Amino acid sequence: QVQLVESGGGLVQAGGSLRLSCAASRSAFGIDVMAWYRQAPGNQRELVADISTDGSTNYADSVKGRFIISRDNAKNTVYLQMNSLKPEDTAVYSCKVIRRVLGLPYVYWGQGTQVTVSS
């Protein structure tokens, strides 16, 4: 089992910045893709960004140029630097980690952290 601990959410004014962190159990091995998702009230959960073990990244069009995803493989931690925040970025942000054991994927989710952007 992999435990994920998220931190960094909160309330910020439009144009501000926040940094989210998601730490997986340090003893976990086989961590593959790490990602951030978000879900606003009344909306479906959507992918914000993901990052592979080699550092390649993928972003939702709505956050390109404003958000940066990064990871520290030694710490099994993924980060999301969010800049130029907009009220429409308000949502619960959750991290997702895919772990591969003997080639099989196992998916783990964080508990979610609220991000609120005021206008």
Image (cartoon, helix red, strand yellow):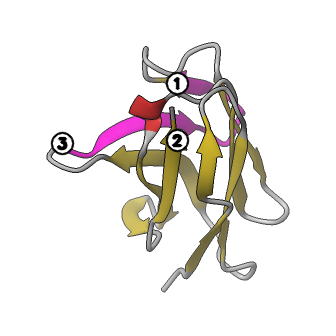
- What is the C-alpha distance between the residues marked 3 and 2? 17 Å
Q: Characterize the local packing of mark 3: few (<14), some (14-19) or many (20 or more) Cα atoms within 10 angstroms.
A: few
Q: Report helix, strand or loop for mark 3.
A: loop
Q: Report helix, strand or loop for mark 2.
A: strand
Residue 22 lies in what quarter of the image?
A: bottom right
The single residue placed furthest to the bottom in the displayed view is 1
| Residue named by callout 1 | 58
**Residue at coordinates 78% horizontally, 55% vertically from top-left?**
73
Residue 2 position within the rendered picture, expressed as x and y whole percent measured from the top left:
53, 80
- What is the C-alpha distance between the residues marked 1 and 3? 21 Å
Disc on res. 117: 2
Q: Characterize the local packing of mark 1: few (<14), some (14-19) or many (20 or more) Cα atoms within 10 angstroms.
A: some
Q: Which residues are magenta?
A: 43-58
Q: Check if mark 3's residue and mark 2's residue have beta carbons within 8 Å.
A: no
| Residue named by callout 3 | 43
Q: Amino acid at mark 2?
A: Val
Q: Nearer the viewer, mark 2 or mark 1?
A: 2
Residue 87 lies in what quarter of the image?
A: top left
